[in-house]
Image: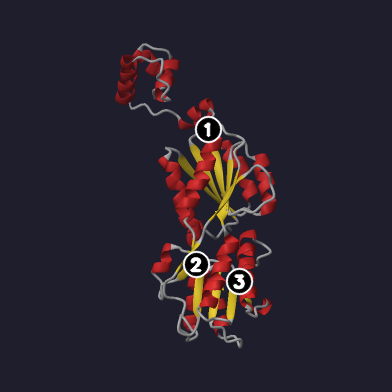
């Protein structure tokens, strides 16, 4: 198997010159020499060792994407939000001629040694808990960019949404449609800062409108389609006679629609439902889902911009962006 020294001997140049051509550092290499080396490389079908080049240059052109809190029996495709976010990040990284290394883990701490051993140039972390941020930043010897993470940690790059306004818009829309018996279906907001801010916005809108909303109107569920089916049945059969359900994610809204249907109720004629995220699947369910929309591509662009600011030398770059959300009106909410 050919190595760098063999190529250099065939071309009659030093190994350093061959290395410069392979790495695109041809400022001091004549056009004739460059062409001769490239011709030999093609003729012998030489494949440079990517890991060796990575170590030599101290860069791998690889960016990690870490999806935390994924159990051994799960995968990120089970949650369409993760699929959309990973796809958007991959496109932005690919457009810069870098590669993505995806890792789903139950505990984001355990991935740090793996990222370091692969010599990644940086890593995105999706939805990390506040208490994990400091340890990640301290342990990872590369730029870290967080998405949908709330933290008091200084000097980080985080890109998320105006989650408070999203929750507020959700309630205001339902109230504006005449609903005053509203159930809220969400995970425990004490375990997620994102959910908590959406919850606080929702509560504020109810208070402003004089809507009597209390803890009994909150139904807990994981962000999981099957769990949401069961909760949808509970809400539909509740003695409180809810006319509308607000959620904190579209995947939960999809499950609620199915659960409500299974116990003989119709959306939106009997119960209205509003989602959050504006996943593409919202166009395909029946009825089409009214939801609070976020722009996945814009979030990925902001996060990638921050990543490459740091990779290209701006080590002091910080960002705490909360991108706007908007209501997308379809068919799942009824005027009463």
Residue 255 disc label: none
The residue pinned by badge 3 equals 205
- Circle 2 is placed at which residue position? 250
- Residue 260 percent coordinates (x, y): 50, 81
Query: In terms of secondary structure, where does tag 3 sit?
Result: helix
What is the crowding at mark 2: few (fewer than 14 residues within 10 Å), some, or many (at least 20)?
many
**In this picture, is 38 found above or below 145?**
above
- From the viewer's perspective, is residue 313 above or below residue 76? above
Counting from the top left corner in percent of width and height, residue 287 is at: 41, 76
Between 45 and 266, the one lying in front of the other is 266
Of 177 and 292, the residue lying toward us: 177
Which is nearer the N-term, disc 3 or disc 1?
Answer: 3
3 or 1: mark nearer the eye: 3
Quarter-of-image position of residue 246: bottom right
The secondary structure type at the circle numbered 1 is: loop
Labels 3 & 1 near each other (Cβ < 8 A): no
Q: Closer to the camera, 229 or 320?
A: 320
Please state which of the two labelled residues, at mark 2 or mark 1, is closer to the viewer. 1
């Amino acid at each position: 198997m050919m190595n760098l020294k063999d190529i250099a001997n065939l071309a009659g140049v030093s190994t350093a010159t061959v290395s410069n051509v392979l790495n695109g550092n041809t400022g001091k290499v004549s056009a004739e020499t460059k062409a001769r080396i490239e011709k030999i490389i093609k003729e012998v079908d030489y494949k440079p060792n990517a890991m060796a080049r990575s170590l030599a240059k101290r860069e791998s052109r690889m960016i990690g994407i870490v999806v935390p809190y994924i159990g051994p029996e799960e995968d990120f495709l089970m949650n369409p939000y993760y699929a959309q976010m990973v796809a958007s990040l991959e496109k932005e990284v690919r457009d810069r001629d870098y590669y993505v290394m995806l890792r789903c883990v139950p505990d984001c701490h355990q991935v740090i040694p793996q990222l370091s051993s692969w010599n990644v140039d940086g890593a995105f972390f999706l939805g990390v808990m506040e208490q994990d941020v400091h340890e990640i930043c301290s342990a990872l010897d590369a730029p870290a960019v967080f998405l949908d993470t709330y933290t008091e940690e200084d000097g980080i790059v985080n890109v998320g949404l105006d989650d408070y306004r999203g929750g507020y818009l959700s309630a205001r829309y339902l109230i504006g449609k005449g609903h005053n018996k509203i159930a809220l279906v969400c995970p425990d907001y004490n375990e997620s800062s994102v959910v908590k801010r959406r919850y606080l916005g929702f509560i504020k809108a109810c208070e402003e409108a004089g809507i009597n909303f209390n803890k009994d109107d909150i139904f807990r569920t994981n962000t999981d389609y099957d769990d949401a089916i069961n909760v949808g049945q509970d809400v539909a059969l509740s003695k409180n006679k809810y006319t509308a359900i607000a959620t904190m994610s579209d995947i939960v809204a999809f499950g609620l629609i199915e659960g409500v249907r299974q116990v003989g109720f119709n959306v939106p004629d009997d119960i209205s439902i509003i989602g959050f995220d504006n996943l593409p699947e919202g166009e395909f369910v029946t009825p089409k889902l009214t939801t609070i929309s976020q722009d996945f591509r814009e979030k990925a662009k902001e996060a990638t911009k921050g990543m490459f600011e740091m990779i290209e030398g701006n080590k002091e770059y910080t960002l705490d962006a909360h991108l706007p959300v908007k209501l997308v009106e379809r068919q799942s909410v009824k005027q009463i």
